[in-house]
Amino acid sequence: MQVAELWRYPVKSLQGERLASAEVGPEGLAGDRQWALFDVDTGLGLTARRVPDLLFASGRLRPDGDVQITLPDGSVTSDDAVLSAWLGRRVTLRAAADAPGDRRYENPAEVAEDGEYDWDAFTGARGAFHDSSRIRVSLVSAGTLGTWDRRRFRSNVVLTGEGEDGLVGQRLRLGGAELDVVKQVARCVMVTRPQPGGIGRDTSVLRTVHRERGGTVAIGALVVRPGAVAVGDELTAVGGR
């Protein structure tokens, strides 16, 4: 398999950036999930599971290493007051480096009697704002995606071919980096959410993922040796862990 696409998502749950190459460090692709929006009143980090509107904005790294957000109306900001007005709640944009404590997010649990989700809070990873400390780089193949739009799954690396599920437990060389593949990535309601560019709300995606794939799409890895990766690089196994 080869690298067909590289993606980083500077702001958690916002649209990201397609890259030709990237540095891979201990926390994943440089700049990936390094900012997140937090609800000032609840203290919870916001994701598109709970706030689907997040997917209609995009995050971009500036040349100085800071981040800017493009809102659905095309305006560009990183101002908390502007972001709060857009979302209709008090929010603050935080950098991972400035958020050393526990990061709490919400996951949909059982559907309540009124048809709405009940929500459970969970603690995410330290460092970059990943949901899990066991996933710093996510990879998915074109074969697994099939006709699904890859943007629903927000993986960092899209691979040619198929068969990534069989790589769990393996150490891989990706460009100049080495990864330990530790798990398959469990999927939730977020893959059903609408997004820009004609991606509509589609609850059948998650039903199919559970019925045909045991609830997972993509694999998650930890970085054991930093290095650079570029589109076209081969993914090769270098042994088990």
Image (cartoon, rainbow, N blue to C red):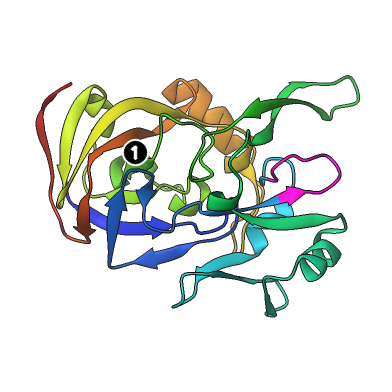
Q: Residue at x 26, y 24 (%)?
A: 168
Kindly indicate the quadrant of the structure image that contains residue 63. bottom left
Name the one closer to the observer, 235 or 10. 10
> Is 182 left or right of 208, judged from the image as shown?
left
Q: Main secondary structure of the magenta part?
A: loop
70 to the left or right of 38? left
* Coordinates of residue 91 in the picture (x, y in percent): 79, 55
Total number of numbered discs in the rendering: 1
Figure quadrant of the N terminus: top left
User: Residue 170 falls in which quadrant of the image?
Assistant: top left
Q: Is residue 81 above or below residue 98?
A: below
Q: Quadrant of the C terminus?
A: top left
- Residue that lies at the very extreme toward the left in this rendered image: 238
Query: Is 215 placed left or right of 163 in the picture?
Result: right
Question: Which residue shows up at 89% across the image and 19% down it?
Answer: 113
Magenta-drawn stretch contains 39: yes
Q: Which residues are magenta?
A: 38-46
Evaluate whether residue 197 shows in this view: no
